[in-house]
Image (tube, grey):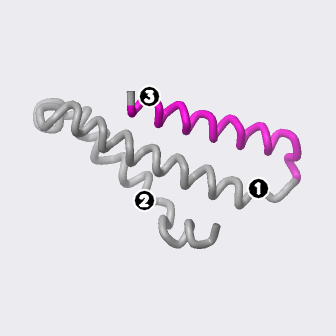
Amino acid sequence: GAVDSALNSAACVLRASAEHIDRDPKADARQLAQQARASIEDTVEQVMRHVGRAVGAGPYCKDPHFAQLMADLPVYVRQSHAERDLAAL
């Protein structure tokens, strides 16, 4: 339930952001993009936390593909500047 709710919220943010940009594609969308990115980053962190707690250590130890995905995901998320980006909002 928690993962589904978080993913649904993220999808709503992405849809609303896309609609906003589509309505005025020449407008400055930097703030909107930063807000959306912050929301998605929060969603990723929630999903990783819930999935990790739900599946336990097994997949991390016995499923190399799962373990690699869970190791790689924070690298992509950390491409933002987290607190600095949030402070700019």
Image quadrant assignment for residue 89: bottom right
Kind of element beneath mark 2? loop
What residue is shown at x 85% (from left), y 47% (from top)?
A: 25
In the rendered image, which residue does mark 2 sit on? 78
Kind of element beneath mark 3? helix
Q: Quadrant of the N terminus?
A: top left
> Distance between the Cα atoms at labels 2 and 3?
23 Å
Label annotation for residue 46: none
Percent x, y of residue 16: 71, 38
> Nearer the viewer's eye, disc 1 or disc 3?
3
Which amino acid lies under the numbered mark 1 shown in the image of this protein? Ala
17, above or below 31, in the image: above
Q: Earlier in the sequence, mark 1 or mark 3?
A: 3
The crowd level at tag 2 (other Cα within 10 Å; few <14, some 14-19, many 20+) is: few
Which segment is the magenta one? Answer: 2-26
The crowd level at tag 3 (other Cα within 10 Å; few <14, some 14-19, many 20+) is: few
Q: Magenta part mainly helix, strand or loop?
A: helix
78, above or below 14, in the image: below
